[in-house]
Amino acid sequence: MCGIAGIIHRDGSADIGNEMTRMLQSMKHRGPDSTGYALFGPPTDLIVIRFKLADSNDRRDFEFKERLERHRLEVESRLNKIGATIDRVESETQYAYRARVRYEGDIKSLTDYLEDIPGCEVLSLGHSLEIIKDLGDAAEVCEQYNLDGFEGTHGIGHVRMATESDVDISGAHPYWAYPFSDVAVVHNGQLTNYFRWKRRLEHSGHRFQSECDSEIIAVYLAEKMADGRSLEEAMNDSLDDLDGVFTYMAVTENSLGMAKDEMAAKPLVLYESDDLVAMASEEIAIRAILDREIDTRDPYEKQVLVWSR
Amino acid sequence: MVTVDDRERRTKYDARGLSEPHANVPKVSDIEEGRASFDATGLSTREINLELRWLLYEEGIGDVTVRNPAAKHSIAVGILRRCNLRIEGSLGYFGLGLIDGPEVVVTGRVGWSVCENMMSGVVVIEKNAGSLTGAAIRGGDLVITGSVGARTGVDQKGGTILIGGDAGAMTAFMMQRGHQIICGDAGPGLGDSMYDGTIYVAGKVKSLGIDCVEGEWNDADTEFIDRKFSIYGLEKPNSFQKFVCGKQLYNYDSLEPHERKLVI
């Protein structure tokens, strides 16, 4: 089933960490397995890398801690080797980290170099994008990663009921569009031509970290955009290229978009005003952050909408 | 401090999966001269429904107003008596399902599957509705002033669905009986695989579904449309197109293809 939510403040920033948590928590019944956020903080010159060195349900053997520490040091040394100046590396949980670095080089080689370390997965990378995902409901993840008070302009989130792949962090949404900075996707639905697209994208050198069908959407869009298509054009292309039932949302540094398949099989409720756009699988999520009476509507089949700040 | 409503965390389920098995009727309504009203803020879905049932069945009150349901799911389901119900705010999924008799006004928007399997009564929704609106309804009038999502009136077996705005994809999919009046545009696949019934569309139709054809207009159609619009005081578009079943998919032959060869 899964629930998705997205919000964009067009007139400045707000506590989107708290807002997304309230939206996602109100949709917990749609997916209790894992919760994920893709939040856009204020852009900086630095690059923010969110990565994990183990999964939250990995077996904790005797040298689990030592291994993590060893791998963390390895990440730092590899960052230095590839020419990134480390501003700081924070440990969010036992296995998830947030690094801020100054780096001008190629993102793909940086990511590949880091992911070569056993257990390492780069969850997100960008000037303002931060992807936070873990098992449990929104309140748990928010508390664990201290998301309350996360100032930002826009973001998307996802509560997952796993159908296509395992319940772990790799299978949780949102997906970062490796290897393109500041692009992420959440998806509610099933893609039926997933393997064909995965093979095709793998041939062009993209890596996939999970068995989850949603991962291809992010990479598909980012690849299109790297070819010069706008987010809206890329999303329109995806309606013809992707088969299955889906409603998905995509975010880039400055915009938030939604797309619905030709059957309108998956839900989405939209609230639109001059300063705020909020959308979610259920209206109850939008009501969780707006206490006034509002007008909402369902986007139609084959519809792509994009809002920019 | 996370301001998440922790009500959900307190929700308990019994062995059958029934949520809040020990919930009590909150009895928070203001009752005055046979009319009752209450504010649903802070009440759980089950508490709202228990309060409604208590008012309608035990107190015998026939006029109830529910304020601020805040898009909760499954509100006012299975009400089987004549009464006036006014819902001030939005409903989530499955609102007003399985009802028989009530006259309802919803001032907000409704989510998916409103009035599923309605038997009789009148429901007027003053804003938009989600997908699967009026799925499998058997009777009564369902009026949506705004626009609706996809698959409106899927499996409709009677009654009338009147839509003031546009309708999405696969509207009237597998419709079997009854009427739909769409004042705006209809999405692709209108009336796909319908068995019977009539669809009137004032705007543009993106595409017709399999075995849905244009029907011949007659005086009964004019009378029906005029009557429905005068009841609900909606603005009537100048002209409608009528769509019915082409009856090309009808096949009551129970023989398998290889058996048929033998018979012939």
Image (spheres, helix red, strand yellow):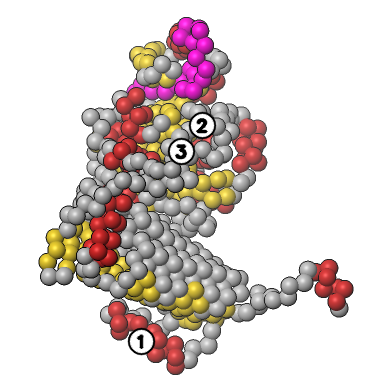
Q: What's the magenta region?
A: A42-67
Residue B48 percent location from the top left of the image = 27, 54
Please name whichever residue, B47 or B187, is drawn nearer the observer in this view of the structure.
Answer: B47
In the rendered image, which quarter is residue A86 located in?
Answer: top left
Q: Which residue is mark 3?
A: A160
What secondary structure prevails in the magenta region? loop
Residue B115 percent location from the top left of the image = 39, 65
SS type, badge 2: loop
Q: Which residue is mark 2?
A: A167
Callout 3 crowding tier (Cα within 10 Å): few <14, some 14–19, many ≥20: many
Q: CA distance from mark 3 to mark 2?
A: 9 Å
Residue A77 percent location from the top left of the image = 47, 8
Q: How many marks?
A: 3
Evaluate whether label 3 is on the same chain as label 1. Answer: no
SS type, badge 3: strand
Please name whichever residue, B148 or B263, is drawn nearer the observer in this view of the structure.
Answer: B263
Q: Which residue is mark 1?
A: B226
Q: Callout 2, which amino acid? A: Val
Tag 3–tag 2 contact (CB < 8 Å): yes
User: Which residue sits at x=23%, y=68%?
Assistant: B60
Evaluate whether label 1 is on the same chain as label 2. Answer: no
Is A169 magenta? The answer is no
Callout 2 crowding tier (Cα within 10 Å): few <14, some 14–19, many ≥20: some
SS type, badge 1: helix
* Residue A9 position (above or below residue B52): above
